[in-house]
Amino acid sequence: MTPLTPQAAAPGLHEDLGLPGVRWLGAGDGPRLVELVRACYGETYSYAGLYRAHEIEALWAEGVLLSLGHEDELGQLDGHTGFWRKDPKGEYVESGLSLIRPRARRGFGVDPTAMWRALLERWSQCAAFIHQNTTTRHPRAQLYAARYMRARPTGWVFDYALGERLVELAEDAAPMHALTMSTALHPAGSESGPGPALAVPRGRWADWLAKLLRGVLPTATVVPVDCSGERASVKLEPIEDNPSLALRRRAVVGLGAVASAMPPARVELVHLPMQPALVAATWASLEADGHVPVGVRPHARRSCEIVLQRLHLDRAREAAAEMTLAGSHVRELAREWLEACARTS
């Protein structure tokens, strides 16, 4: 990614929000964010680099991470939300590293309505979407994202993180799943209208995938397509390699010989552009290779994508059954996903 200073990320983005105690973090604030990470997660947070102040400040200087902090009356950092710039094309940012000091969880001293109204307006000047991965364990986090960030569920990632535990909460030692959510920053979620028809594979997954996409892009035209039963090598290009989570994302670009085999990551995700010919040609091969549909990724200036995770279907069913006990946003998706699993094509 081309380095981009925080000030150049969006016109006016780093201007004062006009909210008491809320400000953008920068040089010299690294140790304070490290302390807040430890106060919230102890030593269990997946991103080891966020325990090293110099690495945090390097991310800020490069514009890869933008950090908004909240200070209490004594000037101690007691809240943080981060924005990761992962898209080389600048179409979306990823919201993450949301931290609230344990003592502030029931009385966080900032008006979220005012804060997110300002943030969404500013991000809309330079991006089309904000994406996030929200733990399925904390329904309040999902409700917060829906209410204040206008985020809508787009699926999940099974076994997203291992071993993370919030301080002062009885956290399960099992792997943490993530509910994926997206905020469309423009009225129709697109800068150029609904665009071409978006393809989903005809059969058991069609309704579930179409519902997810229309939750974010209500005007999207989703069309089921018949998929070839022939299997062939699927050509993939890297999107993201996240060693902290042992997570890898790759995108389908067509059919062809695979240049070199890569050792599997713990979490393997494949993004399939919703182009009719591409979906029709590759779906059978992806399913045969153990990829299960887990959601969608909306876009504005390129094709929306179906997201698949390489995972044994029995393990996926087991994880989805666990999620029927989670918050309402997750329960409905999990039940519909399990119903799709039970249906024949």
Image (cartoon, grey):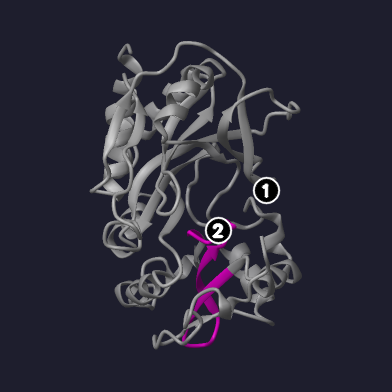
In the image, the segment drawn in magenta is 66-95
Identify the image quadrant of the C terminus: top left
- Residue appearing at x 67%, y 65% in the figure: 2
Q: Is residue 102 visible?
A: yes
Up the image or down, 75 lies above or below 109; here it is below
Displayed quadrant of residue 136: top left
Q: Is residue 137 visible?
A: no
Displayed quadrant of residue 318: top left
The front one of 248 and 302 is 302
What SS does tag 1 mark? loop
Up the image or down, 200 lies above or below 186; here it is above
Q: Residues within 10 Å of mark 2 (few under 14, many from 20)?
A: few
Q: Amino acid at mark 2?
A: Lys
What SS does tag 2 mark? loop
The answer to the question of whether label 1 and label 2 lie on touching residues, with beta carbons closer than 8 A, is no
The front one of 260 and 194 is 194
The residue that mark 1 highlights is: 244
